[in-house]
Image (cartoon, rainbow, N blue to C red):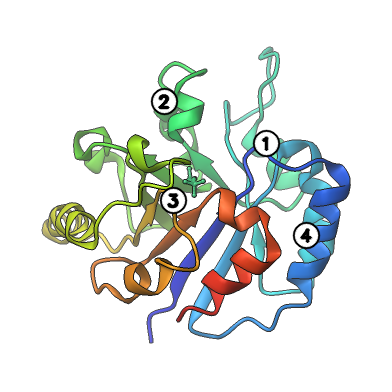
Amino acid sequence: MNQKIIIGNWKNYLNYEESILLSKAISNINISNKIRVMISPNHLYIKEVNEILRKTNVEVIAQNLTSLESKSDTGGISAVNLKNLNINRSLVAHSETRLRQKDPQNILNEIIPIGYQFVLCFEEIDQIPFDLLTNNFEIILAYEPVWAIGTGETASIDHINEIHDQVKSRLKDLSLNIPVLYGGSVNPSNSKDILESKFVDGVLVGGASTKIDQLEGILNSI
Ligand code: 13P
């Protein structure tokens, strides 16, 4: 059975107390073996959140990376420092990151050779660097149309299926075994239909993942 992947991207919504409370609430949820759950808290609190979720099946992942090694890079986040905190995966090139960071995908040239795991977000298929992708370690792709992010305007199932089908065909031609998630206004009312699609390997959830009742609704939708 292929597990669906559900990622909660908390972005910069929660303060310290809220992050700790939500992590504790998540640690008490009985998670179905049909899903794999990842949580991406704000970097400021990632260490504490990871400590709370360490004994669960929930994986804590970073929201962005700017270099492999630590270096002169004010405000940067290195994979080496994340690894030291037992954070072994990061979102890369989220559309909100792209607004501040030029070419956030360049980091892939540094992290792919060492096998640092990542979830690469894309809005257009031509943003996916198919030639860099590999089966050597787990890579995840996430289709996030900008107009659907934080707007309440979820893409239609037909649209999601069409894009995912195109990406999956390209991956198949290259013999790449890489899951493709959908993100953009996913909530408990639409998550079941999206997660049931054979073209969708999971969802990347923003706002709704910061509220325990909504997050539980999504986790329980399959
Ligand atoms: P929303 O679920 O708030 O639309 O955010 C989607 C997203 O950007 C997840 O990374």
Residue at (83, 63) in percent of width and height: 52
- Give the residue type at disc 1: Asn
Is residue 205 visible in the rendered image? The answer is yes
> Which picture quadrant has residue 125?
top left
Please state which of the two labelled residues, at mark 2 or mark 4, is closer to the viewer: 4
Q: Distance between the residues labelled 1 and 4?
A: 14 Å
State whether residue 54 appears in this view: no
Query: Residue flagged by tag 4: what amino acid is it?
Result: Leu
Q: Mark 2 points at which residue?
A: 106
User: What residue is disc 4 on?
Assistant: 22
Instruction: Give the SS element for disc 3.
Output: loop
| Front residue of 1 and 208 | 208
Separation (CA) of disc 1 from disc 3: 16 Å
Query: In front of the other: label 3 or label 2?
Result: 3
Q: Name the residue under label 1.
A: 12
Question: Callout 1 environment at 10 Å: few (<14), some (14 to 19), or many (20+)?
Answer: few
**Type of residue at label 2?**
Asn
Labels 3 & 2 near each other (Cβ < 8 A) = no
- Mark 2 sits near ligand 1, with its Cβ under 8 Å away: no
Name the residue carrying label 3: 185
Q: Quadrant of the N terminus?
A: bottom left
Question: Considering depth in this image, is 121 or 80 the residue closer to the camera?
Answer: 121
Ranked by sequence position, the earlier of labels 1 and 3 is 1
Question: Considering the image in quadrants, where does the C terminus appear?
Answer: bottom left
Q: How crowded is mark 2: few (under 14 residues within 10 Å), some or many (20 or more)?
A: few
Q: In which quadrant of the rendered view does residue 55 lie? A: bottom right
